[in-house]
Amino acid sequence: MNRYYIWTIGCQMNKAESGQIASYLELLGYTAASAMEHSGLIVLNTCVVRQSAEDKILGMLSYLKGIKQANPELVILVTGCFVDSKMEALRKRFPYVALFFKPGAYEELITWAEKQGKDVSSVKTGSLLPEHVSPCVFVPIIRGCNNFCSYCVVPYRRGREKSRPLTEIVDEIDGLSRRGVREVTLLGQNVNSYGHDLPSQPGLSGLLVEVCKIENIARVRFLTNHPKDMSRELMETVASMDKVCRHIILPLQAGDDDILRAMRRGYTVEQYRKLVDMTRSTIPSVALSTDVIVGFPGETEEQFGRTLSLIEEIKFVTVHAAIYSPRPGTIATRKYADDVPSEIKKGRFNKIEAIQTKIACEMNSQLLNSVVRVLVEGQKKGKWYGRTTNDRLVFFEDGGSWLGRLVNIKISKTSPWSLQGNLVSCRDSADCCSGEQSELCILNVAKE
């Protein structure tokens, strides 16, 4: 049965790579199945950043083993960060998996398909445009990571940083724009180090300038940044480009210098503060998000308190909190005992969730009765949804067709995690929404 299904967990990079895998499979003659049980080929695109993710993979592989026994014709492929250099051990442990291939190693997928008798003449390894695109897509621009933060398994699974050529990226995005894409998010495990391995080409700032020249692209985002690699040049470029969204993710990870040092993050709390100040002074209306890990080995209650205080001080739009999970092979696992009890980790996680809920509620409530500019991404439960340039999620109801369009929404209800409102017109000013420098539409809403 030439129908495929891709099961994806993990980061945005995995989602982008699943789209590429789908493109290759369709060129090979497969068609997408609506559900796993309706497919003859299943691809697991995996993540092992945390133990909980690895547990899900092992559970899925166990489930598929039973399905494979009942249906021997089923083909199972596994990629993503679960696939390490110990291929032979993986094959012995999961003999019912037809192919393990590393993240982005599409040539291995094509070679395997050719051995199965598939016609691969129409397939060229490299960047492909997906058959079906949405208004907002992820585009990988650099893969791998050179940082080796002590808790992170990514460099061991995805290798060292490797940037894609600028012309290749721009050509891909131009092709996507001609197929209806309005917003692109440039991806990298360390996106702001893009181009350092391509000395004859511009870095991320130069790439942003080129992408913004593409006529049909309305918005550009990029993630994930590393604070030690953020430059004033990049901030000034963001500030000068209307199409670049005013939302920057600056992963903090911890608010204590000793923990940051043990994590091998490469900056201090004071340096991070100065970076936040520089970002906010350089980029008008910028919204900041961050990542935090609780329960890192040796973290005391006092050290965690510093993290909590810094979150309250800076006031991020979103905080993605995670409980520390030992990852085999990482520096932290080799060097430190996982000595923070799980119940304390969970308690610290809950404290961050509670304080961030309060902060987000206060920040979003300030947008009540304002008009925001939203790029519509789709529908959920009968409501249109999209995001502002500052990454606020907005829902509205309307009978029109708004997919992929920029609209103005007057906010009538706020909550910590989303906004709701009503569609309004720009009749007070014909070009009031021509810019994207602020999430607020410059509109006199009194007449609406």
Image (cartoon, grey):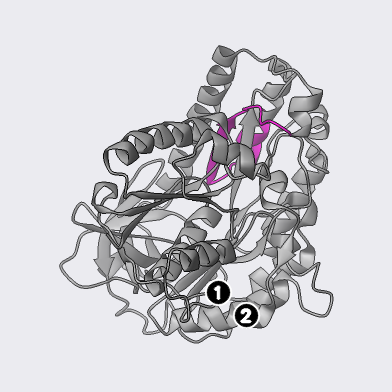
Quick one: 405 or 71, which is closer to the camera? 71
What type is the residue that disc 1 sits on?
Ser
Q: Residue furthest left?
A: 399
Q: In percent of the image, x 41 and y 45: which residue is there?
A: 365
Give the position of the C terminus as an image quadrant.
Answer: bottom left
Left or right of residue 313, residue 200 in this image: right
Left or right of residue 67, residue 46 in this image: right
**Location of residue 384 with respect to 257 vertically, above or below:** below
- Based on the displayed image, in which of its 4 quarters is residue 342 positioned? top right
Residue interval drawn in magenta: 309-329
Asked if the residue under mark 1 is in contact with the one under mark 2, i.e. CB atoms within 8 Å, the reply is yes
| Residue 198, position as x, y percentages in the image | 80, 73
Q: Secondary structure at mark 2?
A: helix
Disc assigned to residue 273: none
Q: Does the magenta-highlighted stretch encompass residue 311? A: yes
Quick one: 347 or 190, which is closer to the camera? 190
Q: Secondary structure at mark 1?
A: loop
Q: Does the magenta-highlighted stretch encompass residue 227? A: no
Give the position of the N terminus as an image quadrant.
Answer: bottom left
Quick one: 90 or 27, which is closer to the camera? 90
User: Which circle, 2 or 1, is nearer the viewer?
Assistant: 1
Quick one: 443 or 145, which is closer to the camera? 145
The residue indicated by pointer 1 is 127
Residue 241 shows in this picture: yes
Label 2, residues with CA under 10 Å away: few <14, some 14-19, many ≥20: few
| Residue 7, position as x, y percentages in the image | 40, 49
The residue indicated by pointer 2 is 168
**Location of residue 353 with respect to 283 vertically, above or below:** above
Q: CA distance from mark 2 to mark 1?
A: 8 Å
